[in-house]
Image (spheres, helix red, strand yellow):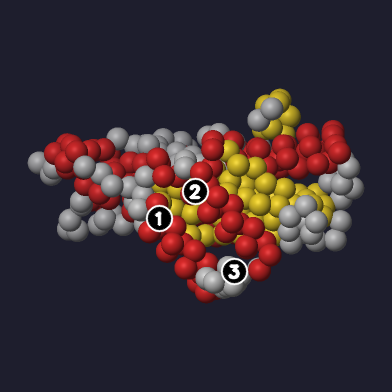
Amino acid sequence: MAEISAKIVMELRGRTGAGMMDCKKALAATEGDIEKAIDFLREKGLASAAKKQSRIASEGIVGAYICEKCGVGALVEVNCETDFVAKTDKFVKLVNDVAKHIVANDPADVDALLAQKFDDNQTVEDLVKSATAEIGEKISIRRFARYAPCEGGKVDSYIHMGGKVGVLIEAKGEINDAAKEVIHDCALQIAAASPVAPEYVRREEVNPEHLEHEKEILIAQARNEGKPEKIIEKMVQGRIKKFYQEITLLEQAFVKNPDQSVQQMIDEKAKGLEIVRFTRYKMGDGLEKKVNDLAAEVAEQTKMK
């Protein structure tokens, strides 16, 4: 049997919200495979799909920049070692400078970004190294997205919780003042939606493999609940509808008025406006945070008897 470390138990607990002992058992049953353990817990009704992302594990901020002249926008996550540094003016300026550079220079990926000339004297990588030396913490550019608006399109951004969450969004249609407000509200929705952040704009975009996997989980859940086979299909259809309402932006309940969906809000305020795409970054998703006493505590509570 694979050795189950305290670290992986904590990761599973952070991703599912399940109890430590349930996480330990799930990992033991799946030979330490965390993705299979998530499915195991969900099938047993011990975890929801709400916490699909890893617990926040690094410090830093997500920043954005929209060029007023060209309309191009960028979203970037830059990491550091402590929350204290993330809040300093120097670090915030670095993030803003990188976002502006991405808008102006359209790098293909992070490696290409780092290799680009930032000014006459240094590359972006040099800029980051200089900031690391000045601030005294390791700094790294983790990821970015860049949107150039399509014809008749507009790009907007929303930064939530001081840079803990950032959203870049593109829409197209008649871009008047009402439409601009709606686009910004949609960006707010993506950033602040709870308990589940949208993953797609509309249900037609949902990955078929994602949908099929969800159906398998829901069927297993229903069977574990002891439901008769003849009603399981109907139950699953109802739960898939809820699944769409959770993961697609347009079907989510609007955060400012939960009595209407986001699509209904758009139709009411800016009919004909189409949300084209979005990117949402939650700072630190999937990265590991230093743990000290908590690791020992979890190890003690999850020892195999």
- Comes first in the chain, label 3 or label 2: 2
**Label 3 packing within 10 angstroms: few (<14), some (14-19), many (20+):** few
Q: Which residue was labeled with disc 3?
A: 119
The answer to which image quadrant residue 45 occupies is top left
Q: Which residue was labeled with disc 2?
A: 90
Q: Which residue was labeled with disc 1?
A: 134
Between 191 and 194, the one lying in front of the other is 191
What residue lies at 74% left-to-right and 61% top-to-bottom? 148
Q: Mark 2 falls on what kind of element? A: helix
Between 113 and 53, the one lying in front of the other is 113
What residue lies at 65% left-to-right and 37% top-to-bottom? 189
Task: Tell me the quarter of the image containing the N terminus.
Answer: bottom left
**Name of the residue lying farthest toward the front:** 121
Q: Is residue 16 left or right of residue 235?
A: left
Residue contact between numbered discs 3 and 2, judged by CB atoms under 8 Å: no
Identify residue type, mark 3: Asp
Residue contact between numbered discs 2 and 1, judged by CB atoms under 8 Å: yes
Residue 189 can be seen, yes or no: yes
Image position, residue 291 (x, y; %): 25, 44
- Comes first in the chain, label 1 or label 3: 3
